Every structure is written in structure tokens, then in C-alpha cells.
């Protein structure tokens, strides 16, 4: 099962400023209170392709878990890691072409992928009328353009139901030699004991996947709204105070940590 959620948004800021805000969105909770769930951010690699002039960056973020609390309640501790605060690593890759006026990003969770995989892709672009000028003046046009469009696509895929189905199949094979009724009873009992009780047996593979994906999609829609609000805060700070003010705020935050 796969569930896809797509949204479009326009920032009333030029493309260079929006791309800068994207990289600064997790730099300080004082700057962006909507990013308090981000525990740390590290840059793995960053380079400019000498042939295309495109900036390629790979970062990893440690965030409080993206799995909704309701999902945790449905799952056994053998899958969620038991009690306590949950956190997961998010791998982020991005490519920026400042001359052509676009940025592509992709973020995916590295933890809990056996339960739920979440892949978020974004495409930031300069509006067509602003990017239709000649290449010689395209950068200047971007500086003059007052807006930046972003299209976001989030794909949810749960494999938990597949894992449960496979486990049931293995248990059924292990009961070789028993009659069909006995094997079915033993398999159901094994599923109840190892994967959270009769809930899974009643819901079925597709039901489990749909439930987890739907819960995650609902939470993500709320998070996307907060993410845009956080970006707006950074963009307004850049507009009124400039980048040096943000770097100073970031430096102070790092010293406190």
C-alpha cells in the first residue's frame, strides 16, 4: 500500500532568499519555534558541481519521531523499541541551481522503515514569468522576482502488514504435519503473542497498512503547515535583519549547547 499527499505553496520572497531560509530552518529554536522537534543537524557533504554550477548537499537530522503517538499505541514494543522518548534520523539531500532557478530536495526517515517509510520531495522554482528571461540576466531576474513556488509530495508506505503476513506464513510452514485447522489456530496464537494481539489478526494486512499510512498522512499535513510557518518566520527575519543577525543567533545557540 502507498499513500501520496501533494501540496503547493507560494512564498512572497525571491528564490535566493527562500533557498537560504531552507538551509537555515533548523539552525535555532529561537529563530524557528516550529522546529523544536529537531534535536540536531549535521552536514555530511556539500559541493558545487564545476560543470553545472549546482550545489549538492547531504544532511542528516535527528528529530523526535515522525510516527504518530496513536501508531505507537497499536504496535508492540518489539517493533517500537519500548518505552521512552522516540527519535529518528532523517536523511536530507538537495540540489540547487541558482542560475536556472530551481531547488530539489528529498527527505526520508532512516528509522522505523519496517513500520512506515516517509519520503518527502520538494521542488522550489521561480515563477515562469520571472524565469523566462535570457540566461545572461536570469540571476538578476531572480533577485527582482518577489515570489517562489514550491510543490511538495509526501509518499507514505507501510510494510508492517507485509511483515506480519510473512511471519504468519513462516509459522504456518513450521506447523507442517498438523491438520489445517490446527495450523491455523497455532498461527493465529503466534501472531497474537508476537505482534500486538488479535487487533492485527482482525484488521488484516491491507487494513494495518492503510491505518498507519492514514494516521501518518494526517499528522504530516499538520506538520507541513507548521513547516511553512517556520519558513515564513525565517524569511521575515532575513528581510528585516539580514543574514548576519541570523548567524549571530545561531552562534549563540551553539555556544549554549
Image: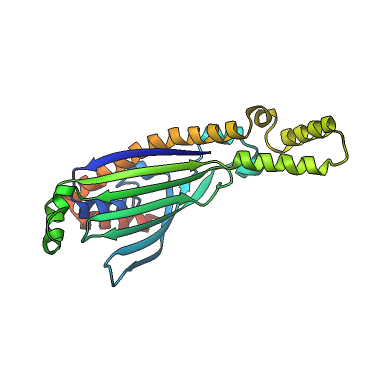
Asked if residue 32 lies left or right of residue 71, the reply is left
Residue at x 28% of width, y 71% of height: 51
Position of residue 54 measured from the top left corner of the image (x, y, whole percent) = 29, 64
Kindly tell me whether residue 231 is visible in this rendering.
yes
Q: Position of residue 212 (x, y in %)?
A: 54, 35
- Image quadrant in which you'd find residue 9: top left
Q: Is residue 228 left or right of residue 187?
A: left
Give the quarter of the image for residue 150: top left
Percent coordinates x, y for residue 193 in the rendering: 74, 35
Q: In the picture shown, does residue 239 fall above or below 229? A: below
* Image quadrant in which you'd find residue 116: top right
What x and y, as percent, mark residue 99?
20, 61
Vertical placement of residue 193 versus 87, above or below? above
Please say whether residue 83 is visible from this viewpoint: no
- Left or right: residue 163 compared with residue 25: right
What colour-coding does the image apply? rainbow
Q: Is residue 169 above or below residue 204?
A: below
Amino acid at each position: 500500500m502507498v499513500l501520496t499527499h501533494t501540496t503547493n505553496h507560494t512564498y512572497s520572497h525571491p528564490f535566493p532568499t527562500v533557498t537560504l531560509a531552507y538551509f537555515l530552518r533548523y539552525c535555532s529554536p529561537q529563530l524557528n519555534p516550529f522546529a523544536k522537534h529537531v534535536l540536531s543537524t549535521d552536514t555530511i557533504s556539500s559541493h558545487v558541481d564545476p560543470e553545472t554550477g549546482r550545489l549538492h548537499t547531504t544532511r542528516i537530522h535527528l528529530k523526535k519521531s515522525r510516527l504518530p503517538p496513536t501508531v505507537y499505541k497499536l504496535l508492540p514494543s518489539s517493533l517500537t523499541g519500548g518505552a521512552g522518548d522516540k527519535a529518528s534520523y532523517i536523511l536530507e539531500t538537495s540540489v540547487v541551481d541558482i542560475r536556472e532557478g530551481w531547488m530539489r530536495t528529498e527527505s526520508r526517515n532512516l528509522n522505523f522503515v519496517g513500520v512506515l517509510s516517509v519520503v518527502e520531495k520538494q521542488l522550489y522554482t521561480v515563477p515562469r514569468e520571472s524565469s523566462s528571461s535570457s540566461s545572461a540576466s536570469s540571476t538578476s531576474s531572480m533577485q527582482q522576482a518577489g515570489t517562489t513556488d514550491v510543490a511538495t509530495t509526501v509518499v507514505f508506505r507501510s510494510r508492517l502488514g507485509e511483515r506480519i503476513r510473512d511471519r504468519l506464513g513462516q509459522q504456518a510452514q513450521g506447523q507442517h504435519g498438523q491438520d489445517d485447522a490446527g495450523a491455523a489456530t497455532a498461527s493465529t496464537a503466534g501472531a497474537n503473542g508476537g505482534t500486538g494481539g488479535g487487533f492485527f489478526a482482525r484488521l488484516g494486512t491491507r487494513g494495518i497498512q492503510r491505518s498507519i499510512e492514514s494516521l501518518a498522512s494526517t499528522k504530516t499535513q499538520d506538520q507541513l503547515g507548521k513547516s511553512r510557518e517556520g519558513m515564513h518566520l525565517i524569511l521575515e527575519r532575513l528581510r528585516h535583519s539580514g543574514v548576519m543577525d541570523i548567524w549571530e543567533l545561531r552562534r549563540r545557540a551553539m555556544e549554549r549547547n
